[in-house]
Amino acid sequence: MTRQIVSVVGGKDAASFTTYDSTNPARTSEVVARVGLADAGTFAAACRTAKEAQREWARTPAPVRGRVIASIGRLVEANAESLAALVTEEIGKPYVEALGEVREIVDTCDFFLGEGRRLYGQTVPSEMPDKNLFTFRNPVGVAAVITAGNFPVAVPSWYLVPALLCGNAVVWKPAEYAAASAHAMYRLFAASGLPEGVLNVVFADGVQTFEGLETALEEGTVQKVGFTGSSEVGRKIGELCGRHLQSPCLELGGKNPMVVMPDADLDLAVEGALFAGFGTAGQRCTSLGTVIVHESIHDAFVERFASAVEEAVVGDPAGEVLMGPLLDQKFADRFEEFIGWIADHHTVLGKVGKITRSEPHGDFTGEGGIYYHPTVVDGVTPEDRLFLEETFGPIVGVTTFRTLDEAIELANLPGYGLSSSIYTTDPPRLPLPRGRLGGHGQRQQLHQRRRGAPALRGQRQVGQRQPPVGHVGARPVHPLAGDELGPLGQAAEGPDGRGRHRPGPGVPPLTLIRVEAGSPRVGENHIRPSAGQRRYVSR
């Protein structure tokens, strides 16, 4: 039976004015969810609802809010396999990747749950006698969060978890084509003990969302905007927020380089290029765009890379594959434009275009799904659109360099990026001052024979997204925990005589309920505790 999904505002289902079918890209005849789309008025109303709910939520002591975040993490952890399977079904992400994505929610919760005890203020010396100044960390207010669907649950958690922990309310607008995954994640968050209206989810198309956001900003019901998506739309969001003197968090596209030095381990470099370029079918903001390889090893690298791509497993994302289908038909239509940028001076290694019975990838014919060949294009030049612009999909360009300075210049030429890497076996001899590759703040990796997961921050056209935890002095402060300078206020309610936190006025105490294995948790059979597990949920 097809899932029926609508927006939820203030804990209640909201009206819809049209519907959208979210389909399985691996089998497009399968409808994963029928989504009721809201209009601009519903989005604006959700922001007003969030504003009212945020007042009481902000009064809840931050360590208690941290306990709710802990409950979210445990609920997601208990339902990780089911949520990952839903992500795979809805957007075609290989199950192993989807499971790792769900784990990011748990990790984010585990990191931020303790931040509720570290939203420190400051004492500030005064030039006036007998005066003391203090700073307090106060919530910003209501955050409007708009996210893409290529990471339908991990990326939203980077916004939602810290925003809620810091005492803000959220209106979240997920991508329509990933609505079922977003709705399941919302229900897990709601079951953790969040008061109604603190987290609201609104399904709407881009036009209605923009109009609703514009209304909310005019009404003063939104104090922070977070957006993950294309640079084109991000500019419009930035312009809209700028008219209201707000600074949005933007995480946009990226053209990401990989430099392969002449002394590099080619097998390791090929392994990295394969997953960086074609994992998630090349549909990550951090996906590899161009391999910049030293001319002395170009032929050897290209031969190995082409062979690896030819042997890579493409197929049903529920199985053990490198890549599955594209996210949705609209991305396939756009990808057709990208492969149209291939010119006569390029050399295409392998096949290009849609996988079909007449053009299979190995034995895989791609029937019934939106599957495309992983494509390597050699001979790209700095003037090519394939070199300069993000190509959201399974296509990687290759070019050459002679000197390290030339490689760095080529890597930075597109002007925007979210990741960069250099492959070498002798990093101490690499004269690379920190920050030269990719500019300020971009994720950089120096590959020898190990892997890592550094922090993520973009440069230039990629937006102005703050990292999960900013710093004021030596103290971690999230952008959604505002700074207010003022006199010392009334003492907060503290622990009672038994060591438990006594909520302040107007904040009901949290009660713990035990959820037994096998009992419904948030309303549907595919979201439930694992067998033999007991979970304590704050509510």
Image (cartoon, rainbow, N blue to C red):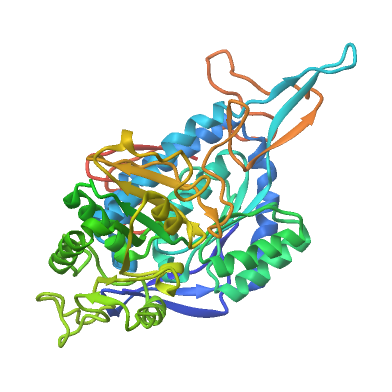
Is residue 316 toward the left or the right of residue 57 in the image?
left
Residue 488 point in image, percent of width and height: 78, 22
Q: Residue visible at 46% across and 60% down?
A: 254
Q: Residue visible at 90% across and 12% down?
A: 129
Asked where in the image residue 235 lies, by quadrant, the reply is bottom right
Tell me if residue 155 comes above or below residue 34 in the rendering.
Answer: above
Q: Residue visible at 32% across and 35% down?
A: 429
**Where does the N terminus fall, quadrant-wise?**
bottom left
Residue 144 point in image, percent of width and height: 61, 57
Can the viewer see residue 306 in this picture? yes
Tell me if residue 450 comes above or below residue 39 in the rendering.
Answer: above
Can the viewer see residue 372 in this picture? no
Residue sitting nearer the eye, 524 or 401: 401
Is residue 508 toward the left or the right of residue 230 in the image?
right
Residue 43 point in image, percent of width and height: 63, 66
Tell me if residue 76 comes above or below residue 201 in the rendering.
Answer: above
Q: Residue furthest left?
A: 363
